[in-house]
Image (cartoon, helix red, strand yellow):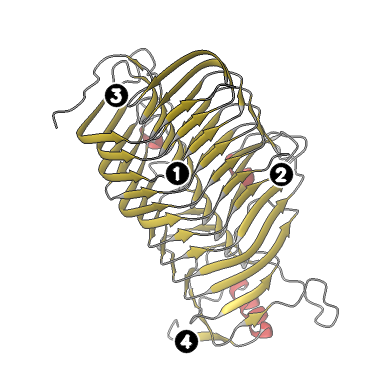
Amino acid sequence: DKAEVFTIASFSDLWEYKGAVESGSTLNAVLVNDIEIPAEGDVMIGITWSPINAPNYDGTIYGNGYAIKGLYAPLFNQTSASFKGLHLVVNVTETANPNFGAFARQLVANGNAPKFEHCSVSGSIKINTDIAPATADVLEDGATGGFVGIASGIHFENCVNNATLELKKFSSTVKMWGIMGGIVGLAGTTSFTNCSNNGSLNYTDTTGKTAADLGGLVGTYTGKKATATFDNCSNYGDLTIADTAKARDCNIGGIVSIIDGAKDASDADNKKSVIFENTTTLGGNVYVNGAVANTLRLGGIIGSNYSFSTVEINGPVTKSGSISVTNKVSAHAYIGGLLGHQGSGGTFNINDFVTITEDADISVSAEISSNCYCAGGIGTSSRPDNGKNPYVRIQYKTVVNNADLTFSGTCGGTLRLSGFVGYTYNNYGFINHTGKFVNNGKIEVTEDAVIDAMDLAGFSGYVNGYNFSAGSD
């Protein structure tokens, strides 16, 4: 009978609640005090906290504004629970399981619609594992979020992450996907209303085995027919690849690092839709100071929008955080104030005003082994597959770029810089707009830069293809 509740006034009550839920109880829980988790290995208590393991539990924990403090492991392992007014304070160095979130490693809707309302996480989360899974390059092997590692069918409202996240190591033997998000690591269909990330995300892995996929709110979007909505959301946390780090691949986005889309037009199940409603604020800085062994895709909102996924921006965007790339990228570099890389068959529609402020400068002093496409708006729009994967589309209403773009590094291929789009390879696709683009930013290649070929422009560094429409306004 859910008219009854489980009252949690102490750690012993929390421990009793854990046992009841794991035994099948469906009661909701209510906190009436702050709860302190005893230190790990505390001989006086004789209890080591382990996550509540209740995959089918769909009750609600009402925090009443109170906090559970001192967590050194997730509150839940896997669950379908909802959380209201609950705050977690964590101090974690995770060495066993890289799927990590302060509330749960995994949260899945099992016929219900789990919600987070007025919740927060603060403290420190460090992932320092050395695992060797049976299958290499499996996304689920490395999903870390401030709230939840893996989530699908979940709604977040008035939630904030203040915790710092650090990826120190996943595996020294097997290639891994190092996915980190301020709120969710790996997400299927989810929605966010009035949510923000204030915590920094730091990649310090020196093994070179792990990809660095860092997203201010969400690491990676995947799952069949996944749809994501961000309504009045923001990121103020800095995203950093440390100067000694070695990433084997890299996707970084102020809100989402990568949207993992369909491979071709027939793969309808894997087409994604990501929608930004109302105001989106991007105040966090991005620092790529370490080495990237493969391609770098970096964007103020999204690092990479892969093939056959749609992004709609239906509200104003203000970007004030800067971007800096200083070390070495051993392949291509796609860098955009809004979007790093637009894949073939996809769309990126700006249906409202975007303002890129003066302090949102982009500075590249790195050694880029191949091509470097860099722009105030979008780094590159990919080539469709000989007409088989058509309709790459970038559509915008009004974009005002006030940020400066400076290149002072080395480019082993072609360097293309512009105020809006670095490189557009749009056979069978198009770019158009019904508003205007204004570039007030300075585009500069310094005297000490080393380049073989270069294209610079206020709008697009290079256009290769058909159906380029400048609009009518």
The secondary element bearing badge 2 is classed as loop
Distance from the alpha carbon under mark 1 to that under mark 2: 32 Å
What secondary structure is found at the residue carrying circle 4? loop
- Of callouts 1 and 4, which one flags the residue occurring earlier in the amino acid sequence? 4
The disc, 3 or 4, on the residue closer to the chain's N-terminal end is: 4
Q: Position of residue 404 (x, y in %)?
A: 43, 36
Specify the amino acid type for callout 4: Glu
Sort mark 1 into few (<14), some (14-19) or many (20+) by Cα contacts within 10 Å.
many
Screen quadrant of the C terminus: top left
Disc 2 packing (10 Å; few <14; some 14–19; many ≥20):
many
Q: Residue at x 66, y 52 (%)?
A: 166
Q: Quadrant of residue 51?
A: bottom right
Residue 4 circle label: 4
Inter-mark Cα distance, 3 to 4: 55 Å
For label 1, the residue is: 360
Judging by the rendered image, the residue that carries numbered circle 3 is 391
Q: Is residue 94 left or right of residue 182?
A: right
